[in-house]
Image (cartoon, helix red, strand yellow):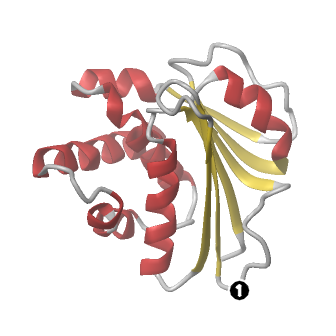
């Protein structure tokens, strides 16, 4: 496995930081070196949020990503801000429900995932992040889906079993959109 440098970005309240935390916990579960660097505006819900996640077999020098292997964007401001951080040949995942604009990059692999619409169809738009995470896992070998599921208790301490099951459904839906 090469070093994976992932930027997840969107509005506060879309589960951006949780998505990154799950990737980091899953990486630790698999014995990888990981960093998780969250950033959010003072508005929290409705403000901007992003996180940098690095997963590697080797020690990591810095948690800051200047060139990402993958960028996951859940809204248009995040696409505009973080698209330039993606290295040539990298993967760009766009929440197509909320982002109607196309990427300007022709040197990257772009995939549009209707994450928010899928989450609405499942009955809770809060699980759009899990739809997107499932798509990411289907496209990469960054971590195994089972490692993410085992990490739910760490990332979501105060969740209900019903919401955990919905998160798993959303992840599987995201995976199925790719396969």
* Quarter assignment of residue 47: top right
Q: Is residue 158 visible?
A: yes
Residue 159 picture location, percent across and down: 20, 50
Residue 61 picture location, percent across and down: 79, 78
* Quarter assignment of residue 4: bottom right
Q: Tell me the residue at 50%/86% (across/down).
A: 31
Q: Is residue 123 toward the left or the right of residue 142 in the image? A: left
Where is 46 relative to 86, above or below? Answer: above
Q: Is residue 123 toward the left or the right of residue 11 in the image? A: left
The residue sitting at the front extreme is: 42
Q: Is residue 15 toward the left or the right of residue 8 in the image? A: left
Looking at the rendered structure, the number of numbered marks drawn on it comes to 1
Where is 115 relative to 55, above or below? Answer: above
Where is 112 relative to 62, above or below? Answer: above
Q: Tell me the residue at 73%/19% (across/down).
A: 102
Q: Is residue 150 toward the left or the right of residue 94 in the image? A: left
Residue 127 picture location, percent across and down: 34, 36
Query: Quadrant where the C terminus lies?
Result: top left
Label 1 CA crowd tier, 10 Å (few <14, some 14–19, many 20+): few
Query: Quadrant where the N terminus lies?
Result: bottom right
Circle 1 residue: 58
The foreground one among 39 and 9 is 39
The residue sitting at the top extreme is: 100
Mark 1 residue element: loop
Q: Is residue 138 visible?
A: no
Q: Tell me the residue at 40%/39% (across/down).
A: 131
Q: Tell me the residue at 12%/45% (across/down).
A: 162
């Amino acid at each position: 496995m090469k070093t994976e440098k992932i930027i997840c970005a969107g509005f506060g309240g879309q589960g951006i930081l949780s998505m990154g935390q799950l990737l980091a916990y899953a990486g630790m579960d698999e014995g990888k070196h990981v960093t998780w660097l969250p950033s959010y505006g003072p508005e929290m819900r409705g403000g901007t949020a992003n996180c940098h996640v690095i997963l590697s077999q080797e020690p990591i020098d810095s948690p800051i990503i200047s060139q990402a292997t993958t960028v996951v964007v859940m809204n248009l401001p995040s696409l505009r801000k973080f698209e330039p951080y993606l290295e040539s040949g990298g993967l760009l995942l766009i929440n197509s429900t909320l982002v109607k604009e196309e990427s300007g990059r022709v040197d990257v692999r772009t995939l549009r995932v209707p994450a928010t619409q899928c989450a609405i169809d499942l009955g809770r738009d809060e699980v759009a992040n899990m739809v997107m995470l499932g798509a990411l896992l289907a496209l990469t070998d960054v971590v195994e889906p089972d490692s993410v599921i085992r990490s739910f208790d760490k990332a979501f301490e105060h969740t209900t079993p019903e919401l955990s099951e919905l998160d798993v459904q959303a992840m599987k839906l995201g995976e199925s959109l790719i396969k």
